[in-house]
Image (cartoon, helix red, strand yellow):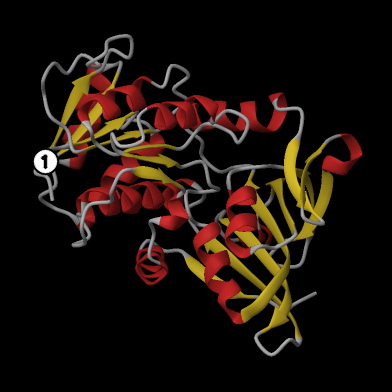
Amino acid sequence: MSPDPILLIGGSGVVGRWTARFLRDANPDAPLLIGGRDLAKAEEAAAELGGAEGVALDLAADDLGLGERPVSAVAVLFMDEKIAGLRFAQSRGVPHISISPGINEISPEVAAYIHDPDAAPVVLGTEWLVGATTVPALEFARAFGRVHDIAIGALLDEQDAFGPAAEADMERQTNTMPAALVRRDGAFLWRVGDDARATFRAVDGTEMEATAFSPNDVVGLATATGAPNVRFDLAIGVSSTRRRGEPLSTEIVIELAGEDHAGRPLSTRHAVVHPEGQVPPTGLGVAMVLERLIGLDGGPATPPGLYFPYQLLDSTAYFARLEQSGGAILTLEVL
C-alpha cells in the first residue's frame, strides 16, 4: 500500500466531499489531496475533513500544477473533456477513475488506455451511483441459472441536492444525448423518440414516468450475465419516502427474470434505497474503488487494466458499507 496521497480532482464538490468522508472514516491515516481550480474552496473542504490538504490544480499543465509531488491514485469527479487527470495518472503509473463520461463519451479514456495498457488501472466509473446498481444486480443474479431480462428503474427525487458538476452531468446525459443504449433480443440498439419513453413502479408501487438512460450499467450487466434484454429507465419526481411524508430518498428498482438453476421460471424484484439521496452512495462507490485500486482494503493493489467499478467491488463489503452509511436493500413483491 502506497503512503502517497490520493488526489481527488473536484474534491471540494458535493460528491468529492462524500468520497473524502468515506475514505477518511474507513482509512483514518490515508493522506488526501483535495484538488480544484479554486484553492480557497479546496482548502476549506480539506480543513472541514481534517488530515487533508487543499491544492490548486491547473488542468492545462501536464503535471496539473503539482510538480513532482507523488500521488497514489487519481479520482476525477466532474467531466474532464481533456482527460487531463487520466493523462497525469498514466504518466505517474497510478490508478485513475472518472465518473462523468456517458456511454457515448468514453472513447478518449479507452483510447488512452489502449495506447498505454501497462501504465496503470483505468476505471470507467460512470455506472449509476458507481456500483449501487451493478453490484446488487449481479448478486441477485446468482440465484439464476440463466437471466433473460434485467430492468433497472432509477428514481431521483426532484428535491435531491446536486452539486454543479453533477447537475451538468445530468443535464448533458438526459437532455443533450439523442439516444439511450438498450440490449433487446441480444442486440445492442439505441432508444429514441417514443421508444425512449417508459414507466416503472417505484418502491411504494407508484407508477413513474421515466426516460431511457444508458450509463455503463447496460453494457456491463449485459456482458456479465449474458442477459439478452437489459434496459435502464430514469425518473425524476417524488420519491416513495417523501410521498408518505418522510424526507426524500433515492431508489433503484432492480427486476430480474429468467430461470433458476433447475430450469424453472424465476423472477425477482429488489430495491436499493438511501435516505440521504444519490450523492452518498456515489461517494461510497468512488471511495471503495479507490481503496481497492491501491490496496487500502488490505488486498494487493489492482494491476493495470481497464475496469468497471463492479469488477473491483466485493459485494459483501459493499453491502456492509452501504448499510453503515444509512442505505438499505429491500426485497419487493414481483409485479
Count of numbered circles in the view: 1
Q: What residue is drawn where x is 84% and y is 35%?
A: 192
Q: Secondary structure at mark 1?
A: loop
Amino acid, disc 1: Gly
Left or right for 197, reference 280: right
Question: Residue 107, relative to residue 294: is it above or below?
Answer: above
Question: Residue 45, relative to residue 278: is it above or below?
Answer: above
Q: Which is nearer the eye, 25 or 237?
A: 25
**Residue under numbered circle 1:** 51
Q: What residue is drawn where x is 46% and y is 56%?
A: 310
* Quadrant assignment, res 114: top left
- How many residues crowd around disc 1 within 10 Å: few (fewer than 14), some, or many (20 or more)? some
x and y, in percent, of residue 31 in the image: 13, 41
Q: What residue is drawn where x is 65% and y is 64%?
A: 254
Residue farthest along the right direction in this orientation: 194
* Quadrant assignment, res 68: top left
x and y, in percent, of residue 153 in the image: 69, 56
x and y, in percent, of residue 173 in the image: 64, 31
Q: What residue is drawn where x is 56% and y is 55%?
A: 249
Q: Which is nearer the eye, 129 or 290?
A: 290
Question: Residue 41, relative to residue 268: is it above or below?
Answer: above
* Quadrant assignment, res 71: top left
Left or right for 301, reference 160: left
Locate the C terminus and report the quarter of the image it occupies. Answer: bottom right
x and y, in percent, of residue 151 in the image: 72, 60
